[in-house]
Amino acid sequence: MIEFDPHHFLNVKLGVHVTQAVFIFVAWAIEIAVFKSSATVDGRAGWYFGLCFLTIPAILYETMCPRFPRTRRFANPYALAIVDGIFMIMWLSAFAAVASWNGTGKCGSGCNLSKAVVAFGVLTWLLFILTTFLSLYALFYYRREGYLPGTSRAPMNAQMIDPDKEAFSTTPHDEYAPVHNQDDHEIPDYSGSERYEQSASSYMPPSVQEEDTSYTGYSGALQLQQTHSDRIHFPPARYENI
């Protein structure tokens, strides 16, 4: 399935209207040649000729207003669709009127040229059918998105992320979480100005001056003397034989 890129909408519609303008100019030039022939001109041929001039402002409005920011406020999607629809009906009536005029035989020696005028009128009418559908598409797109297709500068496949959004954010600074604990004042273990002070529970090695360095001697011998203060009694035996 082919996906239509809305950002190409203005270029597509411009191409169709430019093609219409070329067809209308050629038909207008041929119509002048028909008038110079022996044809008897009435209001039916005159209506086609006058419609060539009436279509010029409509094409300018359809193509120029949506393309420029200063004139975009005049590009109402409802008005664009109505203008295309009205001129679609008007060109249907114009080439039908010339075809009817040719059928009466009043075209004289310019009948062949007048048939070419009808052919270009049919092509212009078909293109107005196309532009009417494009304008209706733009109208529904506007009702869904809030702006005309092709007026947004971002391409269709662009990531809709503003890199400067955080820089211009109105969120207070305290609501942002620290990234990798780079904000030292927000780390829970940070103690501020007491950074280099010793806490009561911190370990402190004992000082040399606080240790008792006095010599007490061998405590084991002292304890033995205090425990066995009487004579030593040997067990009864015949010690004379020793």
Image (tube, helix red, strand yellow):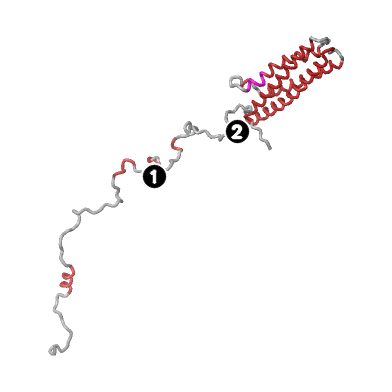
Residue of label 1: 188
Q: Residue furthest left?
A: 240
Q: Quadrant of the N terminus?
A: top right
Tell us which disc is closer to us: 2 or 1.
Answer: 2
Q: Quadrant of residue 34 in the image?
A: top right
Residue 97 in view of the camera: no
- Packing grade of label 2 (10 A; few <14, some 14-19, many >=20) is few
Q: Quadrant of residue 195 in the image?
A: top left
Verify whether residue 33 appears in magenta.
no
| 184 in relation to 230, above or below | above
Marking on residue 156: 2
Q: Quadrant of the C terminus?
A: bottom left
> In terms of depth relative to the viewer, which is nearer, 28 or 139?
28
Residue 163 in view of the camera: yes
Verify whether residue 61 appears in magenta.
yes
Answer with left or right where residue 226 lies relative to residue 114.
Answer: left
Image coordinates for residue 216, horizontal then vertical, percent: 15, 64
| Magenta residues, dominant SS class | helix
What residue range appears in magenta? 60-66
Looking at the picture, which amino acid does disc 2 mark?
Met
Image coordinates for residue 95, horizontal then vertical, percent: 79, 19
Tell me whether circle 2 and circle 1 mark residues in contact (CB < 8 Å): no
Q: Quadrant of residue 76 in the image?
A: top right
Marking on residue 100: none
Image coordinates for residue 57, horizontal then vertical, percent: 68, 16
- Packing grade of label 1 (10 A; few <14, some 14-19, many >=20) is few
Of helix, strand and loop, which one carries label 1? loop
Answer with left or right where residue 140 lies relative to residue 118.
Answer: left
